[in-house]
Image (cartoon, grey):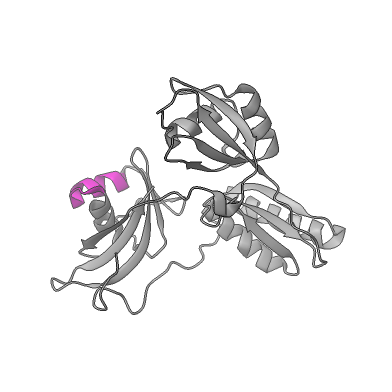
Amino acid sequence: MKWTAKELSSEPKKRGFIPPQTPDEKLFMKRIEELCKQVLFGGQVRSTHFLTDRQQQLATAAINKTGGVEYYWDGGYPQAERKVLTLLPEQDFTYEPPFCSVEIQPAAKGVKLQHRDCLGAILGLGLDRKSIGDILLHQDGTGIVFCLEPAANLMEQQLTQIGRESVLVIRQSFQAHDLPMQERELKTATVASLRMDAVIAAMLHCGREKAVQIIRAGKVEVNHLPVTSVHTEMYEQDILTIRGTGRFRLEQIGGKSRKDRVFIQYYQY
């Protein structure tokens, strides 16, 4: 959907970098800085596990602080959310993806795998979430999982069922342009303001009072950080995680309607 000039904002607001907020986040940044030093002084390539978008922001800040390190983000395809960070010395090193992919095929025809069921079955094997990247689903029901090598080995050996459906796991090699892109519907709404309670009410199609209850109950995270203030202002590209409901990304903030309401566009994951 294309907006008119009036609906578009001339000065889109985006959230700036948020420094580490918890001891775990501070420790994570120190670990990235340590990896950078190992690369600089040891001349070897180093890679992380799959990182969330919040961790990607922290890692980038740590790299900029250290300086002198080449780096590469890769999640298996251009629109990947979870990505692996590879740190390279300044020398001319050839990049090799530090992860692989597997294809999950339902045994029965006509069965379509669901993202939640796939992730639940994979983590049920005892795998850590950080060893798993994005999960892409074909329209024909099969799925692709990006993962670290040990996770791929375990899935090949032990993942035989997702929900009530029997599945076959096959190691695959995919080119980015051959992958099925996840198509999400870009939704449009208008809000009285960019306060979190107003934005959540629009996304969940509920009243402001219900949105306030959800926020104050501690069920909301913004960019993977817990938020309990209904007055929190929302910015473009913010990711809202609402426990028990799902995730949303505030894709774009537009101008105002004739009734002085703000146009927003968002995706629901």
Query: Which residue is at the front of the view, 27 or 124?
Result: 124
Q: Is residue 215 magenta?
A: yes
Segment tinted magenta in the rendering: 204-216
Q: Please state the total of marks drawn on the protein image.
A: 0
Q: Is residue 126 above or below residue 6?
A: above
What residue sits 72% from the left and 66% below the top?
A: 66
> Could one spot residue 21 in this view of the protein?
no
For the point 23% across and 52% down, the residue is 201
Return the residue nearer the eye: 115 or 201. 115
Q: Is residue 52 left or right of residue 43?
A: left
Q: Position of residue 123 (x, y in %)?
A: 54, 30
For residue 247, side relative to residue 95 (left or right): left
Question: In which quadrant of the rendered image does the N terminus lie?
Answer: bottom left
Find residue 5 and report its image quarter. Answer: bottom left
Give the image location of residue 139, x and y in percent.
Answer: 42, 40
Residue 250 picture location, percent across and down: 36, 59
Asked whether the viewer can see residue 67, the reply is yes
